[in-house]
Amino acid sequence: MIRQNRIGLFFGSFNPIHSGHMMLANYMLAFTDLHEVWFVVSPQNPLKEKKTLLADYHRLDLVYKAVDDYPGFSVVDIEFRMPKPSYTIDTLVRLQERYPGSVFSVIVGADSLQSLHKWKNHTQLLEQFRLLVYPRKGFDAGTYAGHPHIEVINAPEIEVSSSFIRRAIASGKDVRFFLPPKVYDYITEMHFYE
């Protein structure tokens, strides 16, 4: 019998990727049934403004630097070759076609469930894929509590956010311990977010 590879897809703008993302991905790999976590870098999230985004290729490069040398972590740039803005369901369908032996789950924050009804084909997504939901302060599963394809993970709440990192850098604060070392070095060298 062939073992199916269980992969958690961690979608995000990663603007920039930070230690909170890495801790969460590590938790998902260590404490759930996932075999791998793939970071899916989104060039443009249809529910976010593009004006605050660092260029696509810089964000992708930062994610590569962050996950370098970590077994079980990979970077996926499939959305860079898809129409923009990218929709999760379209990406999932393409990945399923490309990797038929894999079972994909989507890693999302509890805050994302509040806007899930706005996602393209969200009903189809919930029927075909499992959502692994990590806790966010002030949010719960809401109307999706008890859904058979939604699993709320009892992970530690991580308060750090990319917007906090961007604001801190813009105001000249030292945030080196909030970022993977290679990411911090590259952001500093390139003067990103200043």
Image: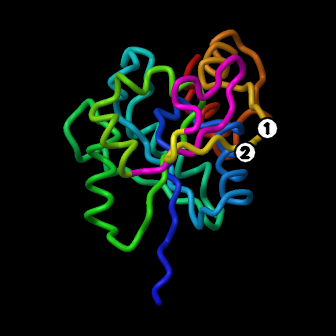
Q: Which residue lies under the disc numbered 1?
A: 156
137 is within the stretch colored magenta: yes
Q: Which residue is located at x 31 percent, y 44 percent?
A: 79
Q: Which residues are magenta?
A: 129-146
What's the residue at 45%, 16% (across, down)?
A: 52
What is the CA distance from the residue labelled 2 to the residue labelled 1? 9 Å
Corner quadrant of residue 115 = top left
Q: Is residue 112 left or right of residue 29?
A: left
Say what secondary structure mark 2 lies in.
helix
Q: Looking at the image, which residue sits at the far bottom?
A: 1
Q: Residue at x 30, y 36 (%)?
A: 87
Q: Pointer 2 and pointer 1: residues touching (CB < 8 Å)?
A: yes
Q: Residue at x 56, y 20 (%)?
A: 193
Judge depth for marks 2 and 1 and give the one in front.
Answer: 1
Along the viewing direction, whichever of 147 and 73 lies nearer the viewer = 147
Kind of residue at disc 2: Met
Of 131 and 180, the residue lying toward us: 131
Mark 1 residue element: loop
- Indicate the quadrant containing the C terminus: top left, top right, bottom left or bottom right: top right
Whether residue 56 is situated above or below residue 172 in the rendered picture: below
Q: Provide residue 110's location: percent of width, then percent of height.
A: 60, 29
Residue 135 place in picture, x, y as percent: 69, 32
Q: Relative to 143, is 100 on the left or the right?
A: left
Residue 128's disc number: none
Q: Residue furthest top?
A: 171
User: Which residue carries the number 2 mark?
Assistant: 23
